[in-house]
Structure formats: C-alpha cells, structure tokens
Image (tube, grey):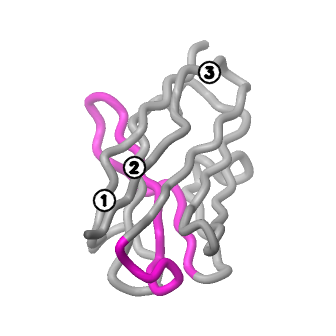
Amino acid sequence: EVQLVESGGGLVQAGGSLRLSCAASGFTFGDRAIAWFRQAPGKEREGVSCIESSSTYYADSVKGRFAISSDNAKNTVYLQMNSLKPEDTAVYYCAARGNRVCRYYGMEYWGKGTPVTVSS
C-alpha cells in the first residue's frame, strides 16, 4: 500500500521557521518526483516545491525562503520553511508523481496534509 504521511506543521510567528516531513512507503522512492503543495482557506491548491533526483524547483512566492530536500535512506522528503509570512498559512500536502519528472499536475499519490499557521 502506498502511503505519504506529512508531519511538522504547526503555529509559528511571522519570521519563524518550520520543517515539514513527508514519509513515503509502498513504492521505490527514487523513481518518483515528489512535490509539496499548499491550500489556503478559500484558495486553490498551488504547487510550492518539487524534487526530482538532484534537481529542485520552487514557486516564485517561496523562492529563497523554502528549501526542499530528500533522504532516500529514510524515504522522506523535507520542506524547510524559513522567514515565514502570514500568507504562507495553509494546509501543506506532499504528493508523488508516476515518474521522476517534476510537474504540479498528474500526481498519483497524495498525503492527507499538515496545517501551517503563521501569525503576524
């Protein structure tokens, strides 16, 4: 059974940091691109960051503040979020594509999300 489980969300003040984790099981971790999405209340879900092999990608809104990384031995992808802003408040999801190419669509598996709240 394929599972993606996010953790690490919480409440943080503006300017603070959080590190999200996405633990994957049930598939060969290195064979798939893994992406982070977020959905704020009343807004559409948006792609935040993606990792494929050693390449990483970021939405303009988080570039320079967020960093995605992976630990293949632990089948885990991380999202280090620094200099958080109130507009980063959202539920954050990780998702896996069916191949190694990063795209923010066509995701095959999703986690259930972890909430992040940034207070001003």
Q: 87 or 3: which is nearer to us?
A: 3
Which amino acid lies under the numbered mark 3 shown in the image of this protein? Val
Residue 108 higher or lower than 67, as above or below: below
Residue 30 among those drawn in magenta: yes
Q: Residues within 10 Å of mark 1 (few under 14, many from 20)?
A: many
Label 2: which secondary element: strand
Which amino acid lies under the numbered mark 1 shown in the image of this protein? Trp
Q: Quadrant of the N terminus?
A: bottom left
Label 1: which secondary element: strand
Q: In the image, residue 83 lies at what x, y percent? A: 72, 34
Residue 5 higher or lower than 33, as above or below: above
Q: In the image, residue 3 lies at what x, y percent? A: 33, 62
Give the Cα separation between the discs numbered 1 and 3. 25 Å
Which amino acid lies under the numbered mark 2 shown in the image of this protein? Tyr
The reply to whether the C-beta atoms of the residues labelled 1 and 2 are less than 8 Å apart is yes
Q: Which is more N-terminal, label 2 or label 1?
A: 2
Residue holding disc 3: 12
Q: In this view, does 66 lie to the left or right of 31?
A: right
Q: Which is more N-terminal, label 3 or label 1?
A: 3
Q: In the image, residue 57 lies at what x, y percent? A: 59, 68
**The residue stretch that appears in magenta:** 26-52
Residue holding disc 1: 110
Label 3: which secondary element: strand
Residue 15, located in which quarter of the rendered image? top right
Q: 75 or 87: which is nearer to us?
A: 75
Residue holding disc 2: 93
Residue lying at 57% horizontally and 15% vertically, measured from the top left: 119
